[in-house]
Amino acid sequence: MVRKYLEKTRQEFFEQKERISEQIKSCENKLKENDKFIELLENTSDPNYEAFTPRETTSNAFNRKKISELQEAQKAETENILKLQEQLGEINFKIDEITSVIRVMEQMDDFVPEEDIYDRKLAILRSVETERQRIARELHDFTTQNLTAIVHKTELCKKILDNDPVRCKLELFTIGKTLRNIIDDTREMIYDLRPMSFDDIGFDITVERTLDKFNSFHKVKCSYIVEGEPYQIDSVVQITLLRVIQEACNNALKHADASVLEVKLYYLGTKIILTITDDGKGFDIDKIPETSRDDNSGFGLSMMKERVYLLSGKIEIKSGLGNGCSIVVTIPKSKEDK
């Protein structure tokens, strides 16, 4: 609440600063115009004529009067500019002061209201429960049903082994094929839980291979760019970043009809920044429900945010109808850097 008020106040100061800057610019333009007008009037006056006659021409009298008026106006404009510059200095000081307070508040992550603590704990439990439901659903729909089918076929082979050996061999062949499918599905589940390639070939190559699969199975151009000197990332951070990439890519393909996906990872001194950009049809962020999917397939935007927040990170999603989507995730390198 306080932070929102400070940000609103700072924005008002920025708007006021812009207005004063425009006023200063307008005054400076008037000064330049008056200088040119004074110069023009001085050039049109005839000093030689006055040297030979005591009478003053009407034109010269008008010019002198106008020059005097313009010089007084110049003084007033100059004083006005000084006052406006003084106001601008005060506003800049206030903006810097509010910005400092906001930065301190951003760093005070240890102070969390009691209701926020409850919400965070609930988010952790919801995240774990959703992951369990996803695994249970996959085990039930694929592994358990395939194993049940193998049991039935094995019992059938026992009955027909002596009377119909040819069919028995065909059933055994089907059993072997089903077992291979179960092994493949189990490996996929293990990979989703914790890719072994993290330990074997590293995080960046794992991401490249994941994007290569998207390139292979879908008509979409995926690119992965690494900025900075790579360093060891915590395993929990690795799996979170990979989940965000997978979910963002799936959404871009299934819902946004994207043809180009660009993933960038920035290794900075105290933080890691992940950006995912697509050229899809985009969406209205305000109309996307903040709930997990009913079929537990993936974890959607809400679970994506939960995972990032649990690592003291920040996630920003920008999108609009016809403007594609951009996701920026910032996660501190370590607990001390948050």
Image: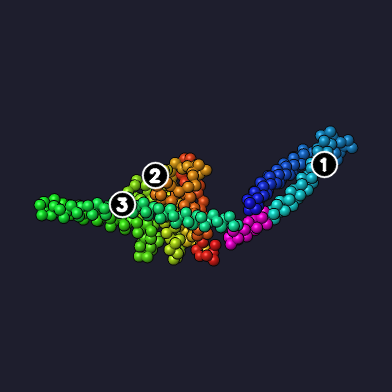
Whether residue 42 is visible, yes or no, is no
Name the spot of residue 90 as percent of width and height, x first: 72, 53
The tag on residue 142 is: 3
Residue 193: name its quadrant.
bottom left
Find the magenta span and give its range: 95-112
Query: To which residue does mark 1 refer?
Result: 68
- Give the residue at x 79% y 42%: 73
| In the rendered image, the vertical position of residue 317 relative to residue 233, given as above or below | above
- Residue 1 located left or right of residue 132: right
Q: Main secondary structure of the magenta part?
A: helix
User: From mark 2 to mark 3, how far is it between C-alphas?
Assistant: 23 Å
- Give the residue at x 50% y 42%: 287
Query: To which residue does mark 2 refer?
Result: 254
- Residue 165 located left or right of residue 299: left
Quick one: 245 or 17, which is closer to the camera?
245
**Mark 3: secondary structure:** helix
Q: Earlier in the sequence, mark 3 or mark 1?
A: 1
Name the spot of residue 37 as percent of width and height, x first: 74, 40
User: From mark 3 to mark 1, how far is it between C-alphas?
Assistant: 94 Å
Name the spot of residue 31 as percent of width and height, x first: 73, 44
Residue 281: name its quadrant.
top left
User: From mark 1 to mark 2, how far is it between C-alphas?
Assistant: 74 Å
Report the mark closest to the observer, 1 or 2.
2
**Mark 1: secondary structure:** helix
Q: Is residue 105 magenta?
A: yes
